[in-house]
Every structure is written in C-alpha cells, then in structure tokens.
Amino acid sequence: MQHNLEHRIGDYVVRAARPADVEGARRVMLDTFYKEFGHGYDPRWHADVIDIEDAYLHHPRHALFVAVRDEEVAATTAVRANGPSSPPHPQWITDRYPSGETAQLFRVYVDRAHRRHGLARALVSMACDFVAATDGYSAIYLHTNPAVEGAEPFWRAVAKQIHDAREDPQYSPSIHFEIPIPH
C-alpha cells in the first residue's frame, strides 16, 4: 500500500519513499551505522538497507518514509511486519511482539545536519498512520540504542517503555517501546 500523502515541515517534504529516494535513504542509513553506531554494516541485521525496494517499496505491509529537502534525503523511518529477534533480545519480548501481527519501526534516522526540525516525529507519525491503515497489525513496537545522542528522550516523548535491557548483560542493551496504533 503506497501512501501518496505529503507534508511540509519548513523546507522539507515528508512522504512515502519513491524509487528515486532509494540511494539517498541508503546513504542516511549507512552513515548512521558507521558514524552514529560505530559498527558499520552487518548483513545479518541490515539486509533491508541493500535491497530497499524489495524490503519496503514492493511489500504491501512494509513501508519506508523519508524527509527530503532539495531532492536530498535527510531522514528515514521504516515499517516492517517483523517482531524482534531473540537473541539479541529477551524471548518474552519476541513472544509479546510476534512477526506478522507486529509492525516494527526500523531505521528512524535523521542525518546529523538536519536534526531538530521535527523530522523524526513527523516520520514516526506517518509510519503509525500507515500501520493503522494496514490490515493485520495489533501492535507497533520498536527498540532503540540509548547510547545514540537524543534517541532515548525522543522515544520517551512518543512511546511507552516496555523494557530496559541495559541492566541485563546477556541481551542487547536496548530500550524496548510500544506506540498505540492510531484510530
């Protein structure tokens, strides 16, 4: 399901990604892996970044949203019908958010030069509206790396914390959140 809605935020257009956005979206994602996370690309966890079109543009229950300014992708947010994996996350989290009926938010990344414009909030809102309009979803789930500057306070402002795994060294030190599906 492609959403044709576009919203303006200052000089930015926030919308569903188009084929012309794929390279720019990939750049934002890979820059985030290398510059923000410090670990780079890992095919076990990031295969969707290499094949963005099949992962998001050609799958009716998945979507990629972008913020664009002057034809440059500045931010991304993705939705996939996949629950979290165990490992690296606790089994009870994967049981609570099963694949197929869970809309997991992925790749909520804003290029450093474009932060503090409300892009992530607008993209997450658009992604949640997509989930509400797509049959078969019962929950919106995400996890975040609290070591990334601004990530934890952002998610605390828009979502409800389910679990903080930083206290348990056997799991990824992520914070798990849920967002209510809009009506």
Image (cartoon, helix red, strand yellow):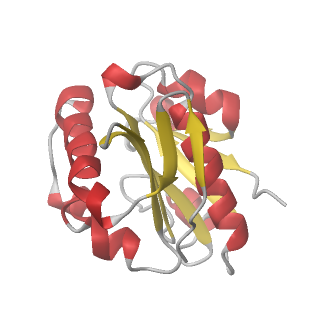
The one nearer the camera, 35 or 82, is 35
* Residue at 68% across, 39% down: 159
161 or 151: which is nearer to us?
151
In the displayed orientation, state which residue is furthest to the right. Answer: 183
Q: Position of residue 129 (x, y in %)?
A: 68, 58
Q: Residue at x 52, y 33 (%)?
A: 119
Q: Residue at x 33, y 37 (%)?
A: 70
Left or right side of 127 for 40: left
Indicate the quadrant where residue 127 lies: bottom right
The percent position of residue 135, horizontal first and vertical second, equals 69, 80
Q: Is residue 143 above or below residue 101?
A: above
Q: Is residue 35 above or below residue 48?
A: above
Split into 4 quadrants, where in the image is the N terminus?
bottom right
Residue 147 can be seen in this image: no
Taking the spot 38% from the left edge, 79% from the top edge, the residue there is 58
The answer to whether 78 appears left or right of 5 in the picture is: left
Q: Where's residue 98, x and y in %?
A: 57, 72
Q: Nearer the viewer, residue 2 or 139?
A: 2
Quarter of the image that includes the C terminus: bottom right
Residue 167 in the image, given as x and y percentages of width and height:
49, 29
Q: How many numbered callouts?
A: 0
Res 133 visible: yes
The answer to which quarter of the image holds residue 97 is bottom right
Image side of residue 161 versus residue 83, left or right: right
